[in-house]
Amino acid sequence: MMGEMQVARSVADLRGHVAGWRGRGETVAVVPTMGALHAGHLSLVEAARAACDRVIVTLFVNPRQFDNAEDLANYPRHEDSDRAILGPRGVDLLFMPPVDEVYPQGFATSVKVEGLSRGMCGDFRPGHFDGVATVVAKLLLMTGADRAFFGEKDWQQLQIVRRMVADLNIPTAITGCPTLREDDGLALSSRNARLSAEDRAIAPALHRAMAAAAQRLRAGEDAAQVLAQARDQITGAGFRQVEYLDLRDPETLVPLDRLNGPARLLAAAWLGPVRLIDNIAV
Ligand code: PAF
């Protein structure tokens, strides 16, 4: 039988649990989240369970990665239902620290991953990736996990985390897990809950336009033209603005103007008050 999920709110308590497991020679996985859990997060939990003896889920809405106070205030918070969802999933420990446990008075350190943090979401959300890199470094060091699981939906974030872990010699193996989608193609996201019924019907146009563009790129069509037409399709479907729609190297994120090997198509677009992101392999 699965043990009951424990909850830790302090780093000392978290480390106490981990020390007990380590003492028995058990391996530890962590799934960092900001809560408002959906099936995408649960797929990360599944992968974590399959990989390690013990699974920690962290739930922390990290103020440092929000470039906009309104977005932070509006970010969905469902602590009770998140706990209920995780209960039967074989999670050993839920780490839910208050903000001042993570950023106590006098906190002064920031982790910045140069290069990869520029462009795309980095340009449109100033400081966002410094906040992500800082909190992920802290969560990996607090938990001391052997392995950590992240969704590919946040592709740029995933590459930044990989680079940071390598650069800082953090001994945690990073695994990216595929994006889960609704039947109509919309990538699962905590932000989807904020779409009106009308916008929810428009939302799959983003993935549809990207999938069509990827197919044309694979067929050898000119990237600039394909991307411009895909942008028009997205706004034509009812999106307010396309922030970026870029073809990039999957690991270095260097922009590509033609397809000459593995590539990733990445986008962010506004639908009403909601900013959606997506990415696919080309
Ligand atoms: O992807 C997320 O939910 C967040 O950026 C993360 C990795 C939990 C850091 O706050």
Image: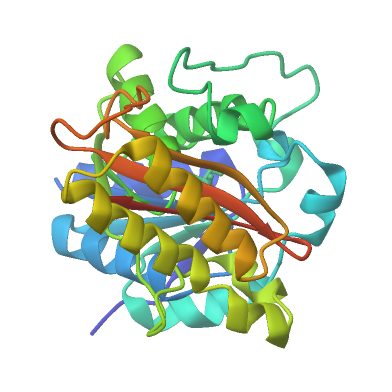
Q: Residue at x 42, y 29 (%)?
A: 141
**Does residue 157 appear to the left or right of 254 in the view shown?**
right
Residue 137 in picture, x, y percent from top left: 46, 28
Would residue 101 appear left or right of 230 to someone viewing this image? Answer: right
- Identify the residue at horizontal 51%, vertical 28% (top origin): 133
* Vertical comparison of 249 with 223: above or below: above
Q: Position of residue 196 (x, y in %)?
A: 74, 81
Instruction: Give the image location of residue 281, x and y in percent.
Output: 25, 50
User: Where the N terminus falls, by quadrant?
Assistant: bottom left
Number of marks: 0
Closest to the observer: 47 or 13? Answer: 47
Pick the front one: 179 or 211? 211
Q: Nearer the viewer, residue 165 or 272?
A: 272
Image color mode: rainbow
- Residue 21 seen from this side: no
Residue 157 image-quadrant placement? top left
Foreground pick, 153 / 111? 153
Quick check: can you spot residue 176? yes
The image shows residue 222 at horizontal and vertical percentages of: 30, 38
Say left or right for 79 vs 212. right
- Quick check: 62 above or below 58? above
Question: Image height check: is 28 above or below 83?
Answer: above
